[in-house]
Image: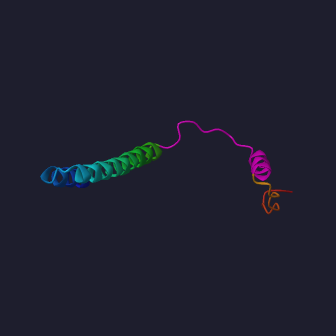
């Protein structure tokens, strides 16, 4: 927000058309960064609450989908839990 305020103050001090166009672009870029920061903070806040629902997942199915989507063969089974 300080960057946005400074861009506005500088732009208003020298209000020629070229300078105003530059300030406008700086403001749009700063606004996009601010939006991304706020979105990231909201995601972080939501993730701190943990999962609302826990659902069992078939890991074999996940690996099969990954393999078909990437065109790569599934990795060899090295699980200590398989027989």
Q: Nearer the viewer, residue 56 or 45?
A: 45
Asked whether, in this view, residue 42 is left or right of residue 2, the answer is right
Q: In the rendered image of this protein, does residue 55 appear above or below residue 29?
A: above
Q: Nearer the viewer, residue 52 or 27?
A: 27
Q: Residue at x 83, y 58 (%)?
A: 73
Q: Does 65 lie within the magenta span?
A: yes
Instruction: Find the residue positioned furthest to the right.
Output: 83
Q: Residue at x 40, y 43 (%)?
A: 42
The colour scheme used to paint the residues is rainbow
Query: Could you say where residue 51 lies in the image, as x and y percent from the top left?
Result: 53, 41
Whether residue 1 can be seen here: no
Query: Could you say where residue 62 lies in the image, as x and y percent from the top left?
Result: 74, 47
Instruction: Find the residue positioned furthest to the left.
Output: 13
Query: Could you say where residue 11 lies in the image, as x and y percent from the top left?
Result: 19, 52
Q: Which residues are magenta?
A: 50-69
Asked whether, in this view, residue 50 is left or right of residue 82, the answer is left
Instruction: Find the residue positioned furthest to the front.
Output: 17
Asked whether, in this view, residue 11 is left or right of residue 74, the answer is left
Q: Does 62 lie within the magenta span?
A: yes
Q: Nearer the viewer, residue 9 or 52?
A: 9
Q: Residue at x 75, y 54 (%)?
A: 70
Q: Residue at x 78, y 60 (%)?
A: 79
Query: Could you say where residue 65 lies in the image, as x and y percent from the top left?
Result: 77, 47
Find residue 72 and report its image quarter.
bottom right
Q: How many marks?
A: 0
For the C terminus, which image quadrant?
Answer: bottom right
Asked whether, in this view, residue 51 is left or right of residue 46, the answer is right
Whether residue 61 can be seen here: yes
């Amino acid at each position: 927000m300080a960057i946005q305020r400074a861009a506005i103050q500088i732009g208003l001090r020298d209000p020629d058309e070229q300078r105003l166009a530059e300030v406008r672009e700086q403001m749009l870029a700063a606004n996009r960064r601010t939006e991304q920061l706020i979105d990231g903070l909201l995601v972080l806040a939501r993730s701190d609450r943990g999962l609302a629902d826990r659902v069992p997942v078939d890991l074999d199915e996940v690996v099969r989908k990954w393999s078909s989507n990437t065109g790569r063969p599934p990795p060899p089974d090295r699980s200590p839990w398989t027989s």
